[in-house]
Every structure is written in C-alpha cells, then in structure tokens.
Amino acid sequence: MSLIPATILTGFLGSGKTTLLKRVLAEAHGQKIAVIENEFGEENIDSDILVSDTNEQIIQMSNGCICCTIREDLRNTLQMLAAKKRKGLLDFDRVVIETTGVADPGPVAQTFFMDDEIAESYLLDSILTLVDAKHAEQQLNDRQEARRQVGFADQIFISKTDLVTQAETDALMHRLKHMNPRAPQKAVHFGEVALSEVFDLRGFNLNAKLDIDPDFLKEDDHDHGHDHGDHDGHDHAPGEACNHPSHTHGGGHHHVHDDDVKSFVFKSDRPFDPAKLEDFLGAIVNIYGPRMLRYKGVLYMKGTDRKVIFQGVHQLMGSDLGPQWAEGEARGSKMVFIGIDLPKDILMQGMEQSLV
C-alpha cells in the first residue's frame, strides 16, 4: 500500500483554518480526506456537514471524508486510521491534522520521522501555516507560538488581506520572509484556494531543490560589511512599542522588527568534509535543537558526485543522496537555518570549518 500523505494545518485563532478545512472537505474533488482535529478545538467543524457521531470519535462526512478528534495522542490515532484503512474499514486518501491555535507543530512533525510504524504508513507532505493579516502584527509581536508556526511552515497562506492596506500586507510579507525565506506566501480569501496549492506540496520530501526566496538571498548579499547590529539602526527595546507601517521608510525594506524567529543561509562553493559536517551538526543539534525549527540544505559533499539533500526539525535530522550534479553545473552548497535566537556566527563559522 502506498504511503498516505499527511498535511499539518496550523495557524492562530481566527486565521481561517476551519474555513479552509470546510472548503477542502466540502469540495467535490474526488479525494477522501481524514481530518484529525486536536481535541480542544476552539471552533470544531460544524455538525451540519457531519453525518453521524460514533463512540469512536470518527465521524463520516456526507462526501465520504472522515473526521476524528484526538482523545489520546496523535500516534495512536494515526495508527488506528492506517490500520482501519488497511483492513478496508475506512476509505480515505490523505490526512489533514489541524493543530490548535497555540500548538507547536514541531512535535507533530517529529511524530512522522521518529516513529517507525507511522513512517511505514504515512508521508508527511507539508506544514501549512495560516496568518491573519489583520491581527498578525500583534500576534507576532506578543506570541512566540505564532512566530514558531511561521518558522515551521512549508507554505504560508495570509488571510483577511482585504481588511488591511496593501502597505500593511507588504510589510507583513517582508517580515514573514525574514523569519522563513523558504515558505512561499500567498494571500487567500475565505478559503478559496485551489487544492493543488494545499496538497502534494512535498515540503518535507528530501527533494533536490531548496526554495529560498531569491530576493531574500539578494538582500543577504549586500548585507555583509555591516552585519553587526540590526540592519536599520533603530532597534526596539523589548518593551518598546512599534507601530510599524508609519516608519518603514521609503521602500519599506528595513525590517523594523527584530523577531526571535529568524533565518539565515549558508552558501559555499567548496565541498564539505562529511565527517566534520556530521560532527558539527550533531553538536549543534545537541545544544540548540529545541530552538532549531527547520533546517534544510542541498549540499556539495566530498566523495560523491551526487547532491546531498539534508533536512531537520528540532533534534531530528536526516540526509539523502539526490540526483547527480549535472555536467557543467556549478557545484555548491546552500543551507537555510530557521530558529529561535540561533547564534548565526557560531553556525556560520562551524559550517565554514566543516568544508574540505
């Protein structure tokens, strides 16, 4: 049986997760979807689109989708669903896990890596994060969980952009890009989003391309000489208020917020020494693992003519041999780190010292 794709849907209260889910469930797309809702859902799926409630917390939808609430941990629920599918008791094509607004998607993602039985049945497709344009500013300023959700995302949907100005949306997108340059961002309206943009994104596949927004890389390049202190010279003290569209000067390209969730990219055209790199990353993950949200790279390694695809969540990392470097292709490594207050200089220096 082929692996069942799973999508983790996260986002703060009111960001539109339920709207998006209902739309996905109600659409006649010929796919049967099992939805796992984290039990303390603030806004459970309306009973009018559900057919029946059973003791097992599994609810059959009118269009053949199923919905279940987690009473025990996620792992048991996933195993139960996979077992029922194998025995032909339940029919579904994919799973969507809706986390509560304040949840950290990290442990949910790790379940798919860490647990052999889960890994034999499921393929984690991607983490989708919904951001509410109207309240994002305040949520990102006040709540670390909101910032973490952005750092984890493979795809970011921004809802309610019609309620704010274009300048505010642009400033928000710029801020999100600094936190997570590898997740494409898309403004969506009331869950009207094509399913091709929700499913089969392969954000967790160890694929050979690393999507980092090209503007982010350009911005990074002319950043060097004065990298100490923040870019625009007006840092806010932790408690200081900041109403930001008013002081994004001119092009609005100064990120006023110094968020604790940040990203940076390591690039080199020299090959890595595999043993040194492994030692260094092992040591880093030991110390900073809980603060490392996502890290992913396509690496040029000594001793193989294939690309090495690397990625990790918190303390768990894995690598895979990718395709061969093409004839005439410039060999080089690119690695993005996304985390909470990670020491950029230590990471950059350690990566540099792991090169041949």
Image: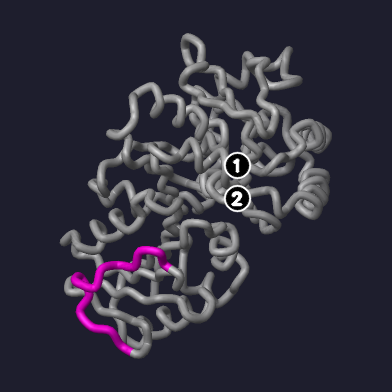
* Quarter of the picture holding the N terminus: bottom left
The verdict on residue 45 being magenta is: yes
* Quarter of the picture holding the C terminus: top right
Question: Is 110 placed above or below 177 here?
Answer: below
Residue 217 visible in rendering: yes
Q: Answer left or right for 239 relative to 5.
A: right
Q: Which residue is mark 2?
A: 321
Give the residue drawn at x 23%, y 57%.
23
Q: Answer left or right for 197 relative to 271.
A: left
Residue 333: image x %, image y %? 65, 34
| Residue lying at the far bottom of the rendered structure | 55
Residue 67: image x %, image y %? 32, 74
Q: As rendered, which of 321 and 193 lies closer to the eye? A: 193
Residue 85 numbered mark, or none: none
Give the residue drawn at x 76%, y 49%.
288
Q: Which residue is mark 1?
A: 307
Q: As rendered, which of 89 and 290 lies closer to the eye? A: 290
- Under circle 1, the secondary element is strand
To which quarter of the image does residue 2 belong?
A: bottom left
Q: Answer left or right for 322 relative to 346.
A: left
Question: Is 274 placed above or below 251 here?
Answer: below
Q: Which residues are magenta?
A: 41-54
Q: Please state the total of marks drawn on the protein image.
A: 2
Q: Amino acid at mark 2?
A: Leu
Packing grade of label 1 (10 A; few <14, some 14-19, many >=20) is many
Residue 163: image x %, image y %? 30, 34
Q: Amino acid at mark 1?
A: Lys
